[in-house]
Structures are given as structure tokens and as C-alpha cells.
Image (cartoon, rainbow, N blue to C red):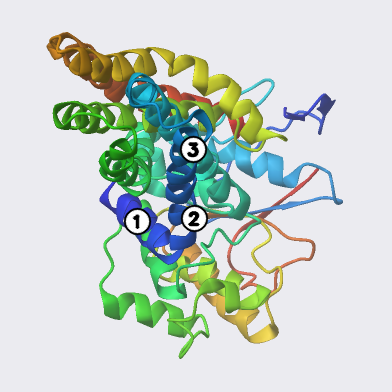
């Protein structure tokens, strides 16, 4: 399990351009909105949570397609299926490596972007926490979609169609938490729900993705 | 019996291999040799029938089966961005082995890749990539079942000699080798060979 994690991190390090591309996409998309919508602070504060969250979602989608597709193309995916380590654990290691290179980076950059939207400091903190809880969820749920679409023509569009609707609850509670913080309401309920979804996904997603991979390679 | 897409590939096959035996699968291009090998490894499900290892269906005792199996497919299964040494290490770890640095370098040198261990795999030729994936066999004394899809593809005569030696050693240890090859193997005739034609 550690072997796959180390291998994927090494590969991501050697292909830094891919990680940087998703990050730049996130920054650009989130920065275009204030420019397009105008400088009205109240309006920006209202849309901040939604915009940053949707931009994070889309940026994660960019790199998800490659989660299993690269391995499938060079034949290493078959070796993963024949490994002595149980496939769900291997899938979990890959998703973890993916999150460290995409979701974590996005979450750490998000507070800077939130400043453009005139979010109060406390809301920025909530944004960071919800993204740290929600981006692993994107990696996990997206991993199921990536496993289902491996080797399929037009995989990236199909992947977005499959995964984005499943991520809607994450988006609602994540963005909702930041809105609640801006309005001064309690956010603990949102945190609890996000954490519960994360725990459920940690158990179910690797297993589902492993099953999907076996079917895809049959 | 296997199918690919909507086509039934070949007539029902009933074959077994015993310790120390070499099972060579031959047939025309497209006959289904690769599909058969993948079905033996459990990667594909047969339309009808089952695959058994040590008497147990392969899908049930997956853990033990994977410990005892090495499958080297058609593709070299290397990551282009990793060096030959890193690729071989990763492949061994996946297979449950923890070879030492010396063992890995030794295997690569046996495979004829001395001085090229640290080059990224994308800069190796087809034959060299094949050698890297086959180098795993030099470290795989513990795995009794080897399933190899066209192992001699792209190998030059020196590498072919080396591969034949490695296969003979495996058979003498009591292991089983299942492989596809277009031509008969120039292996020690004293070793039992079974030929399956598709």
C-alpha cells in the first residue's frame, strides 16, 4: 500500500506541470468572477463560498481523469489488480496521493482567493476547514467515477457527468457552512455532516472503485 | 470458454498444468491467446467454466493466488517517468517482495541493463523495456506460477538465451510456466512441455 503511495507521489513530483495546471485553473476561475460581476462587496460576499467551491470542484475534475487512465494506458493497472495487497487498499492509496497533490493544494490556496471576495476572517477559516473536509470527498467519489470510465472513449466528459451530481451534497454543505459563518450562524452541523460523509466515503468508495476496476478490465 | 466483445473466441478448453511443467499456448493472431492467459490470472471472467489453482477456484482464494502468481502481459507495464530500477522495485513491492538494492541491481544487470538502471523508462528501447519487465522473474524464485504473454517479443538473441535459462531454472524448481509463443522453445527437452493450440 505504501509502495503505491510512494510511487504515485514520485510520479506526481516528476510531472509537476500537471499539478500546477489544476492549481492555476482554480485560481483563474475563482478570480474571473469578481472581475466579471463587478466590485460590489455585498454581492461578492454572497457568492464567495459558491464560487470558490465550484472552482475547486472543477479543478479537481481536471486531474481525476488521470487517476487510473495513465496506469491503464501503460499496462500497470493490470499489475495493480494482481497485487498481493487488496485492491481497495491500493485504490485508497492512489486516492490519497491524488488528494495530496490536488485537493490539499487547492484548500491551502483558497484563503488567498477568498480575500478577493471580501470574506471576513472567520468565514475564511470556515472555508479552509470545509475544503479540507470536502476535497478528500471529491477525490474519493471522483475515484469511483474514474474507475468506471477507465478505458472508455470520451472519459473526461463522462466522468464529470457521473461525479458532479454525486458531489452536490458536498457542495451544498460546504458552501452552506461558509454562508452560515458570514451570517453569524453556527456551522457545527455542516462540519458534522461533511465529516460523516467523509467517513462513509472512506469506507465505501475504495471498495466501489475496486469493483468498478475489475469490471472495467474484464 | 472465453469471449471477447460479442465473439466467442475458441472452442472449450480443458487443460491442467502440473509442477515443473511448461504449458505453451500457440495459435494464430487473434485466436485468443492473450484472453486465455488473462482468464487464467483471474483478470477476465470466462463465459463458461472456471479456473482453479491448487484445486480452489481462482476468484475465491485471491490473496494466496496473487502471492503465488507472476503475470507479465503484453505491455511492458512500466511508468515512463520512473527509472528502470524504480519500476522494478515498484513491481516487486506490488508482488509482495522486498528485494534489497543489490538484488534489484543484480537482476537488472542479469537482464543486460547494466549502466541503464537510472535512466527513465521512456528513454529505453522496446527490447530494453521488455527486459526490465522480465527482470522481475530473476527475483521471483518464490512464485510457483508464471504466466507470460509473448515473453520473447522484441528480445535479441542474448536476452532470449537469458530468458530460456531463467525459465528452465523455474521449471527445475518445480514451478509452472504458462506462456504464449509463436515458435517452439529451444528449451532443455528433458523438461516436460505441453502444447495447447487454439
Q: How busy is the neighbourhood of tag 3: few (under 14 within 10 Å), some, or many (20 plus)?
A: few
Labels 1 and 3 in the same subunit: yes
Which residue is at 21% across, 32% downward?
A124
Residue located beneath label 1 in the image = A9
Q: Above or below — where is A54 with respect to B23?
A: above
Which residue is at 44% across, 34% downward?
A34
Which residue is at 46% across, 15% downward?
A166
Contact (Cβ within 8 Å) of mark 1 with mark 3: no
Query: What kind of element bears circle 2?
Result: helix
Q: Quadrant of the N terminus of chain B?
A: top right
Chain containing mark 1 = A
The span from disc 3 to disc 2 (Cα, nearest Å) is 26 Å
Chain containing mark 2 = A
Residue located beneath label 2 in the image = A18
Chain containing mark 3 = A
Q: How busy is the neighbourhood of tag 1: few (under 14 within 10 Å), some, or many (20 plus)?
A: some
Q: Is A114 in front, or is B51?
A: A114
The single residue placed furthest to the bottom in the displayed view is B115
Q: Is A68 in front, or is B125?
A: A68
Query: Image check: A77 left or right of B11?
Result: left
Residue located beneath label 3 in the image = A35
Q: How busy is the neighbourhood of tag 2: few (under 14 within 10 Å), some, or many (20 plus)?
A: some
Q: Above or below — where is B196 with respect to A45?
A: below
The span from disc 1 to disc 3 (Cα, nearest Å) is 36 Å
Amino acid at each position: 500500500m505504501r509502495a503505491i503511495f510512494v510511487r504515485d507521489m514520485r510520479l506526481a513530483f516528476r510531472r509537476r506541470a500537471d499539478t500546477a495546471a489544476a492549481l492555476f485553473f482554480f485560481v483563474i476561475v475563482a478570480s474571473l468572477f469578481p472581475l466579471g460581476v463587478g466590485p460590489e462587496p455585498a454581492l461578492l460576499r454572497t457568492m464567495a463560498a459558491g464560487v470558490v467551491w465550484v472552482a475547486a470542484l472543477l479543478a479537481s475534475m481536471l486531474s481525476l481523469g488521470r487517476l487510473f487512465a495513465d496506469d491503464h494506458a501503460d499496462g500497470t493497472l493490470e499489475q495493480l489488480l494482481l497485487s498481493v495487497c487488496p485492491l481497495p487498499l491500493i485504490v485508497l492509496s492512489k486516492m490519497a496521493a491524488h488528494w495530496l497533490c490536488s485537493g490539499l493544494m487547492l484548500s491551502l490556496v483558497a484563503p488567498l482567493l477568498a480575500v478577493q471576495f471580501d470574506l471576513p476572517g472567520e468565514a475564511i477559516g470556515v472555508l479552509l476547514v470545509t475544503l479540507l473536509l470536502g476535497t478528500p470527498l471529491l477525490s474519493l467519489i471522483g475515484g469511483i467515477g474514474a474507475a468506471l470510465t477507465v478505458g472508455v472513449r470520451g472519459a473526461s466528459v463522462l466522468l464529470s457527468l457521473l461525479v458532479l451530481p454525486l458531489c452536490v451534497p458536498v457542495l451544498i454543505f460546504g458552501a452552506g457552512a461558509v454562508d452560515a459563518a458570514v451570517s453569524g450562524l453556527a456551522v457545527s452541523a455542516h462540519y458534522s455532516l461533511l465529516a460523516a460523509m467523509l467517513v462513509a466515503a472512506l469506507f465505501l468508495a475504495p471498495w466501489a472503485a475496486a469493483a468498478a476496476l475489475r469490471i472495467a478490465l474484464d | 470458454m472465453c469471449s471477447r466483445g460479442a465473439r466467442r473466441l475458441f472452442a472449450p478448453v480443458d487443460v491442467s498444468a502440473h509442477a515443473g511443467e511448461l504449458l505453451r499456448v500457440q495459435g494464430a493472431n487473434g485466436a485468443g491467446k492473450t484472453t486465455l492467459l488473462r482468464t487464467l490470472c483471474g483478470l477476465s471472467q470466462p463465459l463458461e467454466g472456471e479456473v482453479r489453482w491448487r484445486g480452489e477456484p481462482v476468484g475465491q482464494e485471491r490473496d494466496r493466488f496473487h502471492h503465488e502468481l507472476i503475470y507479465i502481459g503484453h505491455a511492458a507495464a512500466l511508468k515512463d517517468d520512473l527509472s528502470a530500477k524504480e519500476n522494478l522495485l515498484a513491481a516487486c513491492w506490488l508482488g509482495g517482495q522486498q528485494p534489497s538494492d543489490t538484488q534489484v541491481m543484480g537482476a537488472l544487470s542479469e537482464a543486460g541493463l547494466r549502466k541503464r538502471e537510472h535512466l527513465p523508462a521512456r528513454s529505453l528501447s522496446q527490447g530494453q523495456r521488455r527486459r526490465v519487465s522480465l527482470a522481475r522473474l530473476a527475483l521471483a524464485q518464490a512464485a510457483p506460477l508464471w504466466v507470460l504473454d509473448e515473453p520473447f517479443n522484441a528480445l535479441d538473441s542474448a536476452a532470449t538465451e537469458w530468458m530460456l535459462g531463467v525459465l528452465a531454472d523455474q521449471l527445475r524448481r518445480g514451478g509452472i510456466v504458462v506462456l504464449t509463443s509463436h515458435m517452439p522453445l529451444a528449451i532443455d527437452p528433458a523438461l516436460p512441455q505441453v502444447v495447447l493450440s487454439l
